[in-house]
Each structure stands twice: as structure tokens, then as C-alpha cells.
Amino acid sequence: MKIALIGYGKMGKAIEEIALQRGHTIGLKIDIATLAEFTKENLNKCDVAIEFTSPHTALQNIMTCLDAGTPIVSGSTGWLEQWDIVKKKCEEKNGSLLYSSNYSIGVNIFFELNKKLAALMNKQTNYEVTMEEIHHTQKKDAPSGTAITLAEQVMANLDRKHKWVNDEKPAADELLITSKRIDPAPGTHTVKYHSAIDDIEIIHTAHNRTGFATGAVLAAEFLKDKKGIYSMKDVLGL
């Protein structure tokens, strides 16, 4: 499989390493210095694109790949208020898109644990729930996309929470997400239920980028010959 890497920073390089280990080739590497090569002609030489950039460029990068007819795996966060635009474009082009706020297999299992725990805690109104996420200082969005996914899962299963807030004093129906930026942390997410009697916590701590990179390559392998919109739940059969 020939892969186009849209974004060739630390994450792009980690994806390249895993892709090569799994027998794939890299047909295109796009960063600030090579933007002129980000063309339909070059994309058409690749089987799939993997996009990890920034909240400010993700939308246009995804649209460019969809216009070119190149299946795209996107891991950029902080742009999902524009999701409906991308969904419409993908449907119009009969395109292929796989999006996840986090490609780590461990995190996606953590997502399932989070939903189950929230459902179990729904009637336990003496517990207050809070969340914390820690990332490196180069992380451009806060809270992280993973933290937002976790918060949305909690709110979908916990009737007493209707909105998340970031580093503010929450109202009773709001879920507090505390964001910390500490180097060199690649990512730690904690969901905590606190009461006067005891605490219940689930924590996922990434030790490096390998888990994210491996998941992104697995997603590209899954998406290559498919049409439509998918997530890591589809890749992992969760």
C-alpha cells in the first residue's frame, strides 16, 4: 500500500516508521516546505492518505483528499464544529473517510470502559465526576479531542451532566475538564468519580506515540478499498 502523509512532524514520522515496518511505502510527504506537492495528481498515485496536522488546516486538507478521490484517515482534532461540511463532501464524492480523536487501540478500549462506567454511575448521584487531560506543550487545542470524546460519552450516559467546561468553575450540570500542558507527556486522560466515601478512577497513560501511529496505519489498511465514513470502532470491531 502506498501512503500519503499529510503532516510530517513527530506524528507523521512515527506513522512512517510503523508503515514501513508493516511493508507499506510512503508516496508523498506534505509539510510546510512541500505544500506545492499537495496536488490531485500526486494524491492519485497513493492508495490512502493519513492526515495529522492542526485545527486550522485539517478541514482544507481533508477536503483536498476527498476532491482527489483519495481515501483519508484523519487524526487532527479541534475542527469538529465543521464536521457536517466534511460529511456532506464525502457523501457527494462517494468518498472514504475515517476519523478518530485518538487512534490508540488502548484508548479505544478505554472509551468503551468509560461509557460502561458512566452508565453504572448514572443512579449514584452522591458521586461527582471530573476529568483531567495532560499533554505536551506543543498540543495546540485544549481540551484534547480525546477528552472531548470522553466527556461526550459521559454525558450520553450520565443524566445529571449536560455540558462540559474547561478549567472553569462548573455548575451542577456541567462536567469539568482540567487541561494541563507538561513536557514530554504524550497523553494522559483521567475520569474520576468522587464521593465523601471513596473515589473511582479510570486512567489511560500513553508512554509514546507508537500506539497512535500503529492505530493510524491499521485504520489506513482498513479504509483502503472502502467507501463511506468510519471510525476506530469499525477498525477494531468494538
Image (cartoon, helix red, strand yellow):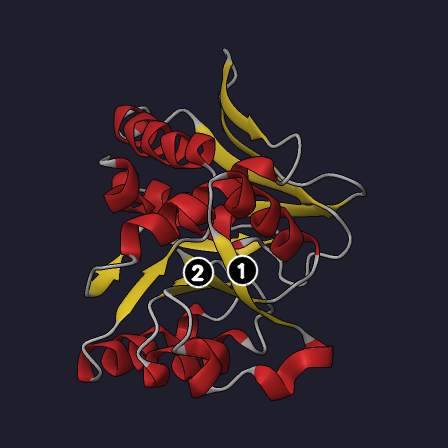
Please indicate, yes or no, whether residue 161 appears anywhere in the rendered image: no
Q: Nearer the viewer, residue 163 or 233?
A: 233
Quadrant housing residue 224: bottom left
**Circle nearer the N terminus (2, 1):** 2
Instruction: Check disc 1 and give the amino acid type.
Output: Ile
| Residue where numbered disc 2 is placed | 2
- Assign a secondary structure to mark 2: strand
Give x and y (percent) for residue 17: 61, 45
- Residue 142 lies, with reference to residue 172, above or below; the image says below
Helix, strand or loop at disc 1? strand
Q: Are marks 2 and 1 in contact (CB under 8 Å)?
A: yes
Nearer-the-camera pick, 87 or 47: 47
Q: Is residue 9 shown above or below 40?
A: above
Amino acid marked by disc 2: Lys
Task: Name above or below for residue 8 compared with residue 60.
Answer: above
Image x and y of residue 134, in percent: 67, 41
Q: Residues within 10 Å of mark 2 (few under 14, many from 20)?
A: some
Q: Quadrant of residue 187?
A: top right
Q: What residue is drawn where x is 54% and y is 50%?
A: 170
**Image location of residue 63, percent across then percent down:** 40, 82
In this view, the residue farthest toward the right is: 183
Say few, some or many: other residues with alpha carbon within 10 Å of mark 1 (under 14 / 14 to 19 / 20 or more).
some
Q: Which residue is mark 1?
A: 26
Residue visible at 42% across and 34% down?
Answer: 105
Give the numbered dot on residue 238: none
Residue 215 lies, in percent from the top left, at 44, 42
Q: Is residue 169 above or below residue 64?
A: above
Tell which of 2 and 232 is nearer to you. 2
Judge whether residue 180 can be spotted in this image.
yes
State the quadrant of the N terminus. Answer: bottom left
Q: CA distance from mark 2 to mark 1?
A: 6 Å
